[in-house]
Each structure stands twice: as structure tokens, then as C-alpha cells.
Amino acid sequence: MIRFLTFFLLLVLLGVSPLASSEDKKSAKVTGTFIIPKTVPDIQGQTVEILLFKYDTRLAGKAADLVEKIEIKDFKHESGKETSQEFTIGAKADLEEGMGYYMTLFVLKDGNRTHMGEAEHAPKNLCKVLTMGNPNKIKMTVLPVR
């Protein structure tokens, strides 16, 4: 019994919770909606690409790692009508301590970017999510690339 208590105390001192379960881990899940305004010209048969990335906030110059990629193929938007689409990304990934997260959304035609999503909470900036006070629920407006 004393050995068990010593082992238990050692784990606690090392910062390892012997009682932690997989349920204690937080998910990297982001839910959101993207909206294409009615003023945007028709989009026919293109692909919407939504990407979630993670990066180590302590390392400069290191490329971000892809967490998940969603593709919506044969996407259509009709000019004169607002198009709204909900999405969920990152639900199967664990939120990692010390990491920052951001998302991108592009509409592609033959692999080229024709439209780009801009986050309501970070207009004209990188769409950071999940950590450092950033949201896990977002809204993006999709506009033509200039």
C-alpha cells in the first residue's frame, strides 16, 4: 500500500494525473458558418476548402501543421441570393497545450483561389481560433480574391 501511495504521489509531483481520462482532453473542434453575400457573382461547380492548422507559439519560423481539411465539391452560389453553409472541423483532434490554431477558407477553381473567407472576429487578419482568447464558434464572409 505504501508503494502505491508513493507511486501515486510521484505521479502527482511530476504533473501527471493518474486519474486523468481521455474525457479530460479538450477537442480542437471549431463550428462555424460561412456566408456568401448576394452581391457576389455566381459560383458554379467549384470547391470550398476549409483548413484547420496548429502551430507552436514558442517557435518562430516553423511551418504550421494541418489538423484537418474539409472539401465541399461542386459548390454552387447564385448571385442575388445569400448562401449560408455550416461546418464543423477538428472534432477528432485533441487541443494541444502550447499550440495556437487558425483556419483558412478558400473557394477554388481548377486549384486556384477565386474567393476567400474573412472571419467576423478578425477582419483583415488571420482567423485564429480555440486558444489565446479566440473563439471555437466562428462566422466567415466569403468574397472574391482581389
Image (cartoon, rainbow, N blue to C red):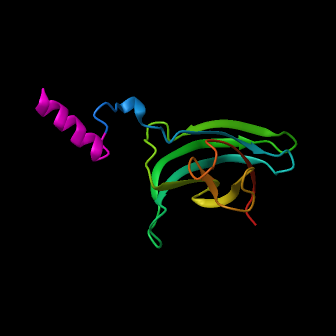
In the displayed structure, 82 sits above or below 41; it is above
Left or right placement of residue 108 versus residue 19 in this view: right
Residue 9 part of the magenta-drawn span: yes
Frontmost residue, 6 versus 69 = 6
Q: Residue at x 45, y 55 (%)?
A: 98
Q: Residue at x 82, y 40 (%)?
A: 82
Frontmost residue, 102 versus 133 = 133
Left or right placement of residue 28 versus residue 141 in this view: left
Task: Give the x, y percent position of residue 91.
Answer: 49, 36
Task: Give the x, y percent position of residue 72.
Answer: 59, 42
Farthest residue in the bottom direction? 61
Farthest residue in the front direction? 2
Residue 130 part of the magenta-drawn span: no
The number of numbered discs placed on residues in the rendered structure image is 0
Q: Residue at x 61, y 48 (%)?
A: 47
Q: Which residues are magenta?
A: 1-16
The secondary structure that dominates the magenta segment is: helix
